[in-house]
Amino acid sequence: MLEIHAESRESWIVVYDEFLHQYGKSDSIVYGFVEGKDDPSFYRGIIKSQLPDGWNVKLIKAGNKDKVFKVFDKMDWSEKPKNRICFFVDRDLSVFLEEETRSSDNIYTTDNYSIENDAVNFETFEAVLEDVFGLNKFSLEEIDSIRLLFESNLVAFGEAMAPVMAQIVLWRKAGANVSLGNINPEEFFEFERGQIRLKESYILQGNRVGHAATRVDAPMSKDTEIAEAEAEFRRQQGCKKYIRGKYLLWFFIQCAKEIYKAIPCLCRKYQKPPKIHIELGPSNGMMVIGPRVRCPTSPRSFLEHNYGSIFSGCNN
Protein backbone atom coordinates (compact mmCIF):
# COMPACT_ATOMS: atom_id res chain seq x y z
CA MET A 1 0.00 0.00 0.00
CA LEU A 2 2.83 2.40 0.84
CA GLU A 3 4.40 1.64 -2.53
CA ILE A 4 1.12 2.45 -4.27
CA HIS A 5 0.87 5.79 -2.45
CA ALA A 6 4.49 6.61 -3.29
CA GLU A 7 3.85 5.81 -6.94
CA SER A 8 0.79 8.06 -6.90
CA ARG A 9 2.75 10.91 -5.33
CA GLU A 10 5.50 10.65 -7.91
CA SER A 11 3.26 10.12 -10.96
CA TRP A 12 3.52 13.82 -11.78
CA ILE A 13 7.21 13.22 -12.49
CA VAL A 14 6.19 10.74 -15.18
CA VAL A 15 3.96 13.43 -16.65
CA TYR A 16 6.80 15.95 -16.58
CA ASP A 17 9.19 13.48 -18.20
CA GLU A 18 6.59 12.78 -20.89
CA PHE A 19 6.50 16.48 -21.67
CA LEU A 20 10.30 16.76 -21.86
CA HIS A 21 10.39 13.80 -24.21
CA GLN A 22 7.84 15.41 -26.54
CA TYR A 23 8.91 19.04 -26.29
CA GLY A 24 10.69 20.56 -29.25
CA LYS A 25 11.94 24.13 -29.05
CA SER A 26 11.40 24.74 -32.75
CA ASP A 27 8.26 22.64 -33.26
CA SER A 28 5.04 24.37 -34.29
CA ILE A 29 3.26 23.07 -31.18
CA VAL A 30 1.86 24.71 -28.06
CA TYR A 31 1.53 22.68 -24.87
CA GLY A 32 -1.06 22.50 -22.12
CA PHE A 33 -1.32 20.59 -18.86
CA VAL A 34 -4.83 19.68 -17.70
CA GLU A 35 -6.24 17.78 -14.74
CA GLY A 36 -8.35 14.87 -15.96
CA LYS A 37 -9.26 12.61 -18.86
CA ASP A 38 -12.25 14.67 -20.03
CA ASP A 39 -10.48 18.05 -20.09
CA PRO A 40 -8.81 17.71 -23.52
CA SER A 41 -12.23 17.26 -25.16
CA PHE A 42 -13.09 20.80 -24.06
CA TYR A 43 -9.77 22.61 -24.31
CA ARG A 44 -8.42 21.14 -27.55
CA GLY A 45 -11.12 22.68 -29.72
CA ILE A 46 -11.02 26.15 -28.19
CA ILE A 47 -7.21 26.21 -28.30
CA LYS A 48 -7.07 25.10 -31.93
CA SER A 49 -9.48 27.89 -32.81
CA GLN A 50 -6.80 30.36 -31.66
CA LEU A 51 -3.92 28.76 -33.61
CA PRO A 52 -2.86 29.61 -37.18
CA ASP A 53 -2.52 26.99 -39.91
CA GLY A 54 0.39 24.67 -39.38
CA TRP A 55 0.28 24.82 -35.58
CA ASN A 56 -1.05 22.16 -33.24
CA VAL A 57 -1.64 21.68 -29.51
CA LYS A 58 -0.46 18.87 -27.25
CA LEU A 59 -2.48 18.44 -24.06
CA ILE A 60 -1.03 16.36 -21.24
CA LYS A 61 -3.23 14.95 -18.45
CA ALA A 62 -1.54 15.36 -15.08
CA GLY A 63 -4.22 13.57 -13.04
CA ASN A 64 -5.39 16.30 -10.67
CA LYS A 65 -4.87 19.94 -9.77
CA ASP A 66 -2.03 19.31 -7.32
CA LYS A 67 -0.06 17.43 -9.96
CA VAL A 68 -0.63 20.19 -12.52
CA PHE A 69 0.96 22.65 -10.08
CA LYS A 70 3.83 20.28 -9.29
CA VAL A 71 4.69 20.19 -12.99
CA PHE A 72 4.45 23.99 -13.14
CA ASP A 73 6.85 24.32 -10.20
CA LYS A 74 9.28 21.84 -11.75
CA MET A 75 9.48 23.69 -15.05
CA ASP A 76 12.67 25.65 -15.77
CA TRP A 77 11.22 28.93 -16.99
CA SER A 78 14.66 30.30 -17.81
CA GLU A 79 14.69 27.82 -20.71
CA LYS A 80 11.01 27.35 -21.52
CA PRO A 81 8.73 30.13 -22.84
CA LYS A 82 5.73 30.59 -20.54
CA ASN A 83 3.43 31.73 -23.33
CA ARG A 84 3.88 28.40 -25.13
CA ILE A 85 3.25 26.14 -22.11
CA CYS A 86 -0.02 26.70 -20.25
CA PHE A 87 -1.78 25.09 -17.29
CA PHE A 88 -5.55 24.61 -16.96
CA VAL A 89 -7.23 23.86 -13.62
CA ASP A 90 -10.72 23.87 -12.14
CA ARG A 91 -11.77 26.34 -9.49
CA ASP A 92 -13.81 23.67 -7.66
CA LEU A 93 -15.12 24.97 -4.29
CA SER A 94 -12.07 27.09 -3.45
CA VAL A 95 -14.19 30.22 -2.98
CA PHE A 96 -15.86 28.58 0.02
CA LEU A 97 -12.77 26.91 1.43
CA GLU A 98 -10.48 29.94 1.58
CA GLU A 99 -7.98 28.10 -0.60
CA GLU A 100 -5.28 30.16 -2.24
CA THR A 101 -5.63 30.32 -6.01
CA ARG A 102 -2.34 29.90 -7.82
CA SER A 103 -1.60 32.89 -10.01
CA SER A 104 0.58 33.14 -13.09
CA ASP A 105 0.13 34.52 -16.57
CA ASN A 106 0.08 30.98 -17.96
CA ILE A 107 -2.24 29.37 -15.38
CA TYR A 108 -5.94 29.38 -16.25
CA THR A 109 -8.48 28.75 -13.48
CA THR A 110 -12.08 28.21 -14.54
CA ASP A 111 -14.62 30.92 -13.72
CA ASN A 112 -16.99 28.34 -12.25
CA TYR A 113 -16.61 24.96 -10.56
CA SER A 114 -15.14 23.30 -13.64
CA ILE A 115 -15.04 23.32 -17.42
CA GLU A 116 -18.28 21.32 -17.56
CA ASN A 117 -20.12 24.34 -16.16
CA ASP A 118 -19.19 26.32 -19.28
CA ALA A 119 -20.65 23.59 -21.50
CA VAL A 120 -24.09 23.55 -19.89
CA ASN A 121 -26.00 26.24 -21.77
CA PHE A 122 -28.77 26.23 -24.34
CA GLU A 123 -26.57 27.10 -27.31
CA THR A 124 -24.59 23.90 -26.75
CA PHE A 125 -27.76 21.99 -25.89
CA GLU A 126 -29.41 22.98 -29.18
CA ALA A 127 -26.32 21.84 -31.11
CA VAL A 128 -26.40 18.46 -29.33
CA LEU A 129 -30.12 18.03 -30.05
CA GLU A 130 -29.43 18.54 -33.75
CA ASP A 131 -26.06 16.77 -34.18
CA VAL A 132 -26.56 13.84 -31.81
CA PHE A 133 -30.33 13.32 -31.66
CA GLY A 134 -31.24 14.49 -35.17
CA LEU A 135 -33.76 17.07 -33.95
CA ASN A 136 -33.88 20.06 -36.32
CA LYS A 137 -37.45 20.54 -37.53
CA PHE A 138 -38.48 23.16 -34.98
CA SER A 139 -40.49 26.28 -35.60
CA LEU A 140 -39.31 29.44 -33.86
CA GLU A 141 -42.04 29.00 -31.27
CA GLU A 142 -41.09 25.38 -30.63
CA ILE A 143 -37.37 26.02 -30.19
CA ASP A 144 -38.19 28.87 -27.84
CA SER A 145 -40.43 26.53 -25.85
CA ILE A 146 -37.64 23.95 -25.64
CA ARG A 147 -35.20 26.66 -24.56
CA LEU A 148 -37.53 27.68 -21.74
CA LEU A 149 -37.94 24.02 -20.74
CA PHE A 150 -34.16 23.48 -20.65
CA GLU A 151 -33.54 26.66 -18.67
CA SER A 152 -36.30 25.96 -16.15
CA ASN A 153 -34.96 22.42 -15.74
CA LEU A 154 -31.46 23.79 -15.14
CA VAL A 155 -32.71 26.17 -12.46
CA ALA A 156 -34.72 23.42 -10.76
CA PHE A 157 -31.70 21.09 -10.83
CA GLY A 158 -29.42 23.72 -9.30
CA GLU A 159 -31.92 24.61 -6.59
CA ALA A 160 -32.38 20.96 -5.64
CA MET A 161 -28.64 20.27 -5.54
CA ALA A 162 -27.78 23.37 -3.46
CA PRO A 163 -28.16 21.71 -0.01
CA VAL A 164 -26.12 18.72 -1.21
CA MET A 165 -23.36 21.06 -2.39
CA ALA A 166 -23.55 22.90 0.96
CA GLN A 167 -22.96 19.60 2.75
CA ILE A 168 -20.03 18.89 0.42
CA VAL A 169 -18.54 22.26 1.38
CA LEU A 170 -18.83 21.32 5.05
CA TRP A 171 -17.14 17.97 4.45
CA ARG A 172 -14.32 19.70 2.59
CA LYS A 173 -13.88 22.24 5.39
CA ALA A 174 -13.66 19.42 7.91
CA GLY A 175 -10.99 17.71 5.80
CA ALA A 176 -13.16 14.68 5.07
CA ASN A 177 -11.88 12.66 2.12
CA VAL A 178 -15.18 11.94 0.39
CA SER A 179 -15.55 10.55 -3.11
CA LEU A 180 -18.03 12.89 -4.81
CA GLY A 181 -18.40 10.47 -7.71
CA ASN A 182 -20.39 8.20 -5.37
CA ILE A 183 -23.19 10.78 -5.29
CA ASN A 184 -25.37 10.17 -8.34
CA PRO A 185 -27.99 12.85 -9.16
CA GLU A 186 -29.91 10.25 -11.13
CA GLU A 187 -31.13 8.82 -7.83
CA PHE A 188 -32.82 12.13 -6.92
CA PHE A 189 -34.59 13.07 -10.16
CA GLU A 190 -37.06 11.88 -12.75
CA PHE A 191 -38.53 13.46 -15.88
CA GLU A 192 -42.03 13.70 -17.30
CA ARG A 193 -42.39 14.88 -20.91
CA GLY A 194 -38.97 16.43 -20.69
CA GLN A 195 -39.57 18.28 -17.43
CA ILE A 196 -37.37 17.46 -14.45
CA ARG A 197 -38.75 16.90 -10.97
CA LEU A 198 -37.59 15.42 -7.70
CA LYS A 199 -38.65 11.88 -6.92
CA GLU A 200 -41.18 11.80 -4.09
CA SER A 201 -38.73 10.27 -1.62
CA TYR A 202 -36.26 13.13 -2.17
CA ILE A 203 -38.53 16.17 -2.12
CA LEU A 204 -37.33 16.92 1.41
CA GLN A 205 -33.80 18.30 1.22
CA GLY A 206 -32.81 16.40 4.36
CA ASN A 207 -33.47 13.16 2.50
CA ARG A 208 -31.19 14.24 -0.35
CA VAL A 209 -28.38 15.27 1.98
CA GLY A 210 -28.82 12.15 4.10
CA HIS A 211 -28.65 9.91 1.05
CA ALA A 212 -25.51 11.71 -0.16
CA ALA A 213 -23.93 11.17 3.27
CA THR A 214 -24.71 7.47 3.06
CA ARG A 215 -23.22 7.25 -0.42
CA VAL A 216 -19.88 8.76 0.65
CA ASP A 217 -19.89 7.16 4.11
CA ALA A 218 -19.58 10.49 5.92
CA PRO A 219 -21.61 12.01 8.78
CA MET A 220 -24.41 14.40 7.93
CA SER A 221 -23.92 17.85 9.44
CA LYS A 222 -26.40 19.50 11.76
CA ASP A 223 -29.40 21.17 10.11
CA THR A 224 -28.28 24.60 11.30
CA GLU A 225 -24.81 24.09 9.83
CA ILE A 226 -26.21 22.98 6.49
CA ALA A 227 -28.61 25.93 6.41
CA GLU A 228 -25.78 28.38 7.07
CA ALA A 229 -23.54 26.77 4.46
CA GLU A 230 -26.37 26.75 1.93
CA ALA A 231 -27.09 30.43 2.54
CA GLU A 232 -23.44 31.23 1.81
CA PHE A 233 -23.50 28.95 -1.23
CA ARG A 234 -26.45 30.90 -2.60
CA ARG A 235 -24.90 34.29 -1.77
CA GLN A 236 -21.94 33.32 -3.95
CA GLN A 237 -24.30 32.38 -6.84
CA GLY A 238 -23.55 28.74 -6.15
CA CYS A 239 -26.64 27.37 -7.92
CA LYS A 240 -25.40 28.99 -11.12
CA LYS A 241 -21.62 28.73 -10.72
CA TYR A 242 -20.58 26.04 -8.23
CA ILE A 243 -22.69 22.94 -8.76
CA ARG A 244 -20.16 20.15 -9.35
CA GLY A 245 -19.45 19.93 -13.07
CA LYS A 246 -19.93 16.16 -13.29
CA TYR A 247 -23.42 16.54 -11.78
CA LEU A 248 -24.25 19.23 -14.33
CA LEU A 249 -22.98 17.01 -17.13
CA TRP A 250 -25.37 14.27 -15.98
CA PHE A 251 -28.19 16.82 -16.04
CA PHE A 252 -27.29 18.00 -19.55
CA ILE A 253 -27.13 14.48 -20.99
CA GLN A 254 -30.28 13.25 -19.26
CA CYS A 255 -32.26 16.38 -20.14
CA ALA A 256 -31.30 15.91 -23.81
CA LYS A 257 -32.36 12.26 -23.73
CA GLU A 258 -35.67 13.06 -22.08
CA ILE A 259 -36.52 15.85 -24.51
CA TYR A 260 -35.61 13.50 -27.34
CA LYS A 261 -38.05 10.88 -26.01
CA ALA A 262 -40.77 13.50 -25.52
CA ILE A 263 -40.25 15.21 -28.88
CA PRO A 264 -43.64 14.16 -30.38
CA CYS A 265 -45.25 16.17 -27.57
CA LEU A 266 -42.96 19.16 -28.13
CA CYS A 267 -42.79 19.42 -31.93
CA ARG A 268 -45.69 18.73 -34.28
CA LYS A 269 -43.42 17.59 -37.14
CA TYR A 270 -42.27 14.51 -35.24
CA GLN A 271 -44.54 11.48 -34.93
CA LYS A 272 -41.74 9.58 -33.21
CA PRO A 273 -38.15 10.35 -32.17
CA PRO A 274 -35.70 10.12 -35.11
CA LYS A 275 -32.67 7.85 -35.25
CA ILE A 276 -29.90 8.82 -32.82
CA HIS A 277 -26.63 9.67 -34.58
CA ILE A 278 -24.29 9.06 -31.61
CA GLU A 279 -24.87 7.25 -28.35
CA LEU A 280 -24.40 9.78 -25.55
CA GLY A 281 -23.59 8.93 -21.94
CA PRO A 282 -21.32 9.82 -19.02
CA SER A 283 -18.37 7.92 -20.51
CA ASN A 284 -18.27 10.00 -23.70
CA GLY A 285 -20.21 13.09 -22.61
CA MET A 286 -17.45 15.69 -22.84
CA MET A 287 -15.98 14.00 -25.91
CA VAL A 288 -19.27 14.63 -27.72
CA ILE A 289 -20.34 17.89 -26.07
CA GLY A 290 -16.96 19.66 -25.70
CA PRO A 291 -16.32 20.36 -29.40
CA ARG A 292 -19.75 22.01 -29.64
CA VAL A 293 -19.09 24.56 -26.88
CA ARG A 294 -18.40 28.15 -27.88
CA CYS A 295 -15.20 29.39 -26.25
CA PRO A 296 -16.16 31.50 -23.21
CA THR A 297 -14.71 34.99 -22.76
CA SER A 298 -12.15 34.32 -20.03
CA PRO A 299 -10.35 31.35 -21.63
CA ARG A 300 -10.38 33.18 -24.97
CA SER A 301 -8.61 36.16 -23.38
CA PHE A 302 -6.17 33.80 -21.62
CA LEU A 303 -5.34 32.00 -24.87
CA GLU A 304 -4.89 35.25 -26.78
CA HIS A 305 -2.54 36.55 -24.06
CA ASN A 306 -0.41 33.39 -24.10
CA TYR A 307 -0.50 31.31 -27.26
CA GLY A 308 -1.72 34.26 -29.31
CA SER A 309 1.30 36.36 -28.34
CA ILE A 310 3.58 33.85 -30.07
CA PHE A 311 2.09 34.76 -33.42
CA SER A 312 1.79 38.50 -32.78
CA GLY A 313 5.51 38.77 -32.07
CA CYS A 314 5.15 39.39 -28.31
CA ASN A 315 7.20 37.73 -25.54
CA ASN A 316 9.33 35.59 -27.90
Image (cartoon, helix red, strand yellow):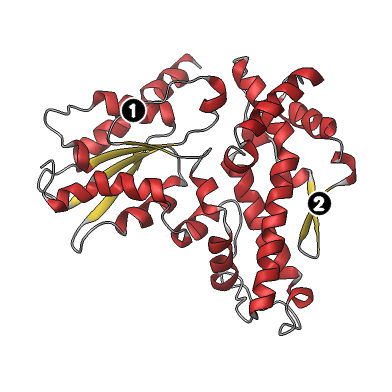
Which percent across, then down, holds residue 65?
A: 43, 30
Instruction: Check the image and name the residue furthest to the front.
Output: 235
Amino acid at pointer 2: Arg
Q: Quadrant of the C terminus?
A: top left
Say how many tags the image has: 2
Residue 3 appears in which quarter of the rendering?
top left
Residue 224 appears in which quarter of the rendering?
top right
Q: Could you say which is closer to the camera, residue 241 or residue 132?
A: 241
Q: Is residue 195 above or below residue 98?
A: below
Q: Is residue 113 above or below residue 268?
A: above
The secondary element bearing badge 2 is classed as strand
Residue visible at 30% across and 47% down in the picture:
303
Report which residue position mark 2 lands on: 197
Residue 62 appears in which quarter of the rendering?
top left
Residue visible at 55% across and 55% down in the picture:
285
Q: Is residue 222 left or right of residue 9?
A: right
Which percent across, then down, holds residue 132?
A: 57, 69
Amino acid at pointer 1: Ser
Q: Could you say which is closer to the camera, residue 299 or residue 36?
A: 299
Report which residue position mark 1 lands on: 103
Residue 284 seen from this side:
no
State which tag comes first along the sequence, 2 or 1.
Answer: 1
CA distance separating discs 2 and 1: 40 Å
Which percent across, then down, holds residue 311?
A: 15, 53
Q: Is residue 54 left or right of residue 207?
A: left
